Amino acid sequence: MESFVNLYVFFFGILLLTMVVFFLIERPKFKFFKLDYRVNNRIKLALYAAIFCVLFSLIAPIVVIYSIYTGNIEKSFVELSGPVGDTIGGVINPFVAMAGVIVTGLAFFIQYRANQIQRDQFYEGLRVQKKQFDESLKHQKKQFEIEIYTEANRHQELRDTQERVEKIQSFERQFYELLRLHKENVNELTIELDKQSASSGKVISGRRVFILFKNELHLIYKLLSNFYKYSYPKYSGKFNLEIFKLAYYLFFEGIVSFRKVDTQDLAINFRLDSSFIELLKRSLLEAFNSYDSEKENQSFYDFNFDPPQLIIEQSFLFLPFVSQSSRLGHYFRHLFFILKFVCEKDEMLISYSSKRYYLRVLRNQLSNDEQIMLFYNWFSGYGTKWEQSDLLLRKQKQGNYFFTDYRMIHNLDESKLIDGIILNNIFSKFEFKNFRYESNRRKEDILFEVHGYQSSLSEEENQLLT
């Protein structure tokens, strides 16, 4: 009996050890199911119940056998083996069956949970895939829109570039055509050195006529200054702007127009005495009518005396006071049109630096005497549109700035002008020195080639003028 009990305990121990090892090995798998706290407790309770049933079914035979043998010592093992076996079977079977039911239920429950988790994971995977698909689709759509936008911009930029190139080419064609017409205008200018026809051969044509224009204006100013000195002996002989403006009027409009305009109106316009205007009218008209190309000097008299009193004798190479408006009017209008055409172009198309380049090409076609006559035309008050002279309007940057911003009289030499015209006195005012220049070239990009004059603008202020 004792050996039987020992053998039974041995097998029981082996079984118990196997269950413990199995539990330790399989324990991590329970984490896979991610069961909540209550479900875990229920599974644990069911497992403990199953283990209890199994343990009880293993212990029960020992208890029964021990009870039977201790209470029935007289009977033999053979006699008791039948009833004992039936008793053990009756006691053990319900507990084993119960443990089997519990374990089988747990197996089904765990399988159900596993299926449920797999299903949830499957649907979660679908949701993740759908989200990834949506994000991918959204990204592809965005990329497609970017590609479309980029392609559209590229085509638009290409079209803009082509359009810009075409506009620049059109501008250049027009500019060089205007330049060609300007040269033709200059070539057509002629002056006869006497009263005879051009067939006499004594004709100056082309760019050289501006030398004669300048000389005639200088001689007229000198003549009027002598008349003024004659009328006002206290006159010091310094440069007189009103006398210059009247001299330019006679040079440009001629003696015929001067004679026809009311004396009082002329006196008011030029701020001179009417008696002085009357003296000029009669004396200059008589000299004009009695001009003799054979004489070296022409005589000018004061006809208020009897006999007339000689005022001055002066030489002219050709008939004076004939009016140069017919020659210079068209020249100045066309030149102004070219400057306006270039300067008013949008700087998004033609930059300031490019405009300066084109106007340098134009200025290179102008002789120094042409630039002097251009300056005289402005300084006399005739060509006020060449350069804004009103200081208030200059502050507001209204009007044209062909002389300062665009340097169209860059080659002007003060020594070649009428004595007493001082460029520094004219362009010394802050509003005149506040002119544009090409970026980072303030010191080099001066107003006049000979006399200098840098802009007073800083680099930052200059950039704001773009």
Image (tube, helix red, strand yellow):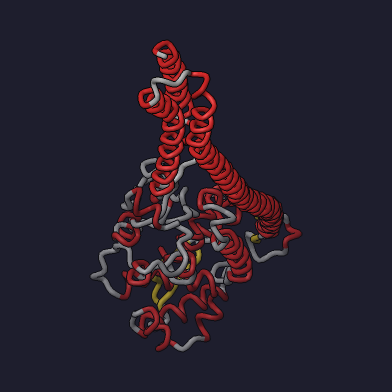
The residue that appears at 52% across and 78% down in the rendered structure is 285
**82 and 113: which one is in front?**
82
* Residue 169 in view of the camera: no
Seen as rendered, the residue at the extreme left is: 234
**144 and 236: which one is in front?**
144
**233 and 274: which one is in front?**
274
Please indicate whether residue 279 sits to the left or right of residue 96 in the image: left
Seen as rendered, the residue at the extreme right is: 199
- Image coords of residue 17 (percent x, y): 43, 20
- Image coords of residue 186 (percent x, y): 65, 57
- What count of labels does the image hold? 0
- Image coords of residue 256 (percent x, y): 56, 80
Seen as rendered, the residue at the extreme front is: 74
* Residue 399 in view of the camera: yes
The residue that appears at 62% across and 64% down in the rendered structure is 334
The residue that appears at 49% across and 31% down in the rendered structure is 88
- Image coords of residue 157 (percent x, y): 65, 52
Tell me the quarter of the image containing the N terminus. Answer: top left
Please indicate whether residue 102 sits to the left or right of residue 55 in the image: right
Q: Is residue 282 above or below residue 449?
A: below
Tell me the quarter of the image containing the C terminus. Answer: bottom left
Please indicate whether residue 440 sits to the left or right of residue 199 in the image: left
Please indicate whether residue 127 sits to the left or right of residue 226 in the image: right
The residue that appears at 56% across and 64% down in the rendered structure is 340
Q: Is residue 432 above or below residue 113?
A: below
